Amino acid sequence: MKNLMLNFHQFFFKPVDQFPLVFLRISIGLFGLLQCGFLSSEWLNLYGVNGYVEWFISYDLFSIKELPSIVGLANFLMPLGITDNMVVILITCIYVVALLGVTLGWHTKIMVVTAWLSHFMLCNTAMTFGYGVETFLHVGLFYLIFAPCNFYLSLDKLQGRGAEVSVTPNAKFIIRIIQIHLCLVYFNAGIAKMMGDDWLQGEAVWYVIGNTNYSQFDLSFLASIPIIPKLMSWWTLVIETAFLVFIYWKPSRRLWAINIIFLHIGIGLLMGLNMFALIMIILNIGAFWWQIFPTFWDTFKTRCTNLNALGFQSSLNIKINLGKWT
């Protein structure tokens, strides 16, 4: 029993460096900004009062009225003469500024909470347009609220607000929770696929690549080589369902870590779900690669921390020069 408790404590609370969480902070912040850039031309059509789905429909049928939304805020501000689309623009500006703050590590906790809340309001206003990418971006922002992630590559550190130490038990706990979350997601996805005959018979991938609404390439030649789409279907089932076991088993974890990345690359290339593929790759690399590919990770961390040290030196030089000038 004592060994079991010790192993449990080591698994969840053994102090580790927070750099994987710093990677997630910067990557998720940049991802959110990239998504905003891609959607900017259609933003009011997605979230505006007279967009593709008008508010009176989306609010009544799809939004959770008890939780924050742009519609609820617009109704609250209406007596002040603030128009609906002005509220959309206001929340959008707050969201973008918060994502910039998250990326730069500037007042990190406040910016993460603000980004999470404003993203929640956007999602709760236009649930009809949400899919996996919105869900996992929101999940990533949520975990960052509790994550120590401003020791490296942050304005907080440069300005004296960063964490005093980089190695903490909290970092290990948050990383483990993200890992378990991903394991459950993949296991659930694999089991759900097994409930249908298409996946078990190996036909599901063929239906995707043969569907012009999804397929990005002409792969009709695979009709004459049916074993390839069948193997791809069965490979997907195995990789997802067994992920929670083999990602932790030392002899297989590198294979599974690489295969799950290839799975998402395939989803992006074959189905055009590039942003969904990217957010899942970001979460997987941040959650697992520090432990599975330590040599790669240490090299990556060293280069980034050298950049961090350069930032400190540059900041110090600027302060010294300013002191001389004044």
Image: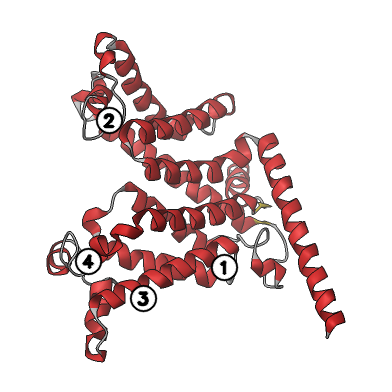
Q: Amino acid at mark 3?
A: Leu
Q: CA distance from mark 2 to mark 3?
A: 37 Å
- The extreme top residue here reads 224
Q: Say which label, 1 or 2, has the lower sequence index.
A: 1
Residue underneath mark 2: 215
Where is residue 314? Give x, y as percent.
78, 64
Q: Give the residue at x 36% y 72%.
A: 91
SS type, badge 1: helix
Residue underneath mark 3: 90
Mark 4: few/some/many CA within 10 Å (<14, 14-19, 20+):
some
CB atoms at circles 3 and 4 under 8 Å apart? Answer: no
Residue underneath mark 4: 64
Q: CA distance from mark 1 to mark 4?
A: 28 Å
**Placement of 71 over or under 296, stated as above or below:** below
In the figure, residue 295 lies in which quadrant?
A: top right
Mark 1: few/some/many CA within 10 Å (<14, 14-19, 20+):
many
Q: Is residue 130 visible?
A: yes
- Labelled disc at residue 108: 1
Question: Disc 4 vs disc 2: which is toward the camera?
Answer: 2
